[in-house]
């Protein structure tokens, strides 16, 4: 394995290692068209081997969203069922990371726009509109450093300090090592997230250790690092040829607009269903 191989997916890190790995547990199951891999990094030895923090990583492989809407009820239920065990009781804060002006990085804010925000609907108003039994949820899309001049982590920490949620859910675009995983893989984890890591622009980590509450991340790979792709395909180092002037190149599908649209819809609806299990799925669709 070459040091330049870059992936945000624990599943791909596990594949690169091959065989059994001490400190890493994994299991697989199938739900309809979804293949689910659950990886548990249980100690520091496993963390070093996999290159991922200790925590749970669930990968749901789905039919390609460029040829499938992704809104199949069975698929939505499969994702919702995987998200639910991560959620504690109480108020949840959802954060959509990314830049809306760069399509492959727009997954977070696009998904956040479809998550049902309910924190402000309380008392008689909530009862009147039939939302009295919904969990309080707040939603933000803090943008990126180049737009705000403020580190994403600073915004998340500041808002969380005032809102005081029982958990924070981060939605962000990811990087894969393989083209065939773009737009057909969803990863859920409780190990936190480093904004910008998918494109090599790693920022301050957002995790339970920093926030004091569980941090659940959700994402879909939308890009592949060009060097990673080339080395994965050829089995040899070729970074110089694919890094003109020292700049790393990123590869994304031609249909990335469709991918982001469908992936953001799938993640948001699955998350809404997990956050409000007592409400019918079709009703939730009509509320956002």
Image: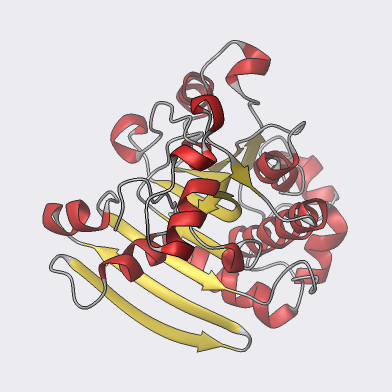
**Scheme of image coloration:** secondary structure
Residue under the image location 53 percent in, 50 percent down: 175
Residue under the image location 62 percent in, 24 percent down: 144
Residue 90 visible in image: no
Residue 268 picture location, percent across and down: 69, 55
Say whether residue 35 is left or right of residue 252.
left
Say whether residue 127 is left or right of residue 19.
right
Residue 42: quadrant of the picture: bottom left
Q: Quadrant of the N terminus?
A: bottom left
Residue under the image location 28 percent in, 35 percent down: 209
Between 126 and 174, the residue placed more toward the observer is 174
Residue 190 visible in image: yes
Q: As drawn, which residue projects farthest toward the front?
A: 241
Q: Is residue 98 above or below residue 236?
A: above
Residue 51 picture location, percent across and down: 27, 51
Say whether residue 218 is left or right of residue 212.
right
Between 280 and 105, the residue placed more toward the observer is 105
Residue 227 picture location, percent across and down: 48, 47
């Amino acid at each position: 394995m070459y040091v330049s191989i870059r992936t945000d997916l624990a599943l791909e890190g596990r594949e690169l290692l091959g065989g059994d790995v001490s400190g890493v547990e994994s299991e697989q199951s199938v739900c309809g068209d979804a293949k689910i891999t659950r990886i548990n990094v249980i100690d520091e030895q496993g963390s070093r081997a996999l290159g991922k923090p200790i925590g749970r990583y669930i990968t749901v492989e789905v039919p390609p969203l460029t040829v499938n809407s992704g809104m199949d009820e069975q698929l939505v239920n499969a994702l919702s069922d995987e998200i639910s065990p991560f959620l504690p009781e109480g108020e949840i804060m959802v954060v959509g990371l990314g830049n809306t002006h760069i399509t492959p990085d727009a997954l977070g804010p696009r998904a956040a726009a479809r998550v049902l925000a309910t924190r402000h609907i309380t008392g008689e108003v909530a009862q009147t509109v039939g939302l009295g039994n919904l969990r309080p949820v707040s939603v933000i899309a803090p943008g990126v450093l180049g737009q705000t001049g403020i580190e994403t982590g600073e915004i998340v920490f500041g808002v969380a300090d005032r809102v005081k949620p029982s958990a924070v859910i981060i939605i962000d675009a990811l990087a894969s090592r393989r083209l065939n995983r773009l737009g057909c893989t969803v990863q859920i984890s409780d190990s936190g997230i480093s904004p910008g890591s998918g494109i090599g622009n790693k920022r301050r980590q957002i995790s339970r250790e920093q926030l004091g509450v569980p941090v659940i991340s959700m994402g879909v790979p939308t890009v592949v690092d060009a060097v990673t792709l080339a080395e994965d395909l050829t089995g040899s180092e070729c970074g110089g040829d694919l890094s003109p002037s020292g700049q790393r190149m990123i590869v994304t599908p031609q249909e990335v607009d469709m991918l982001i649209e469908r992936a953001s819809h799938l993640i948001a609806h699955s998350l809404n269903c997990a956050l409000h299990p007592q409400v019918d799925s079709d009703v939730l669709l009509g509320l956002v």
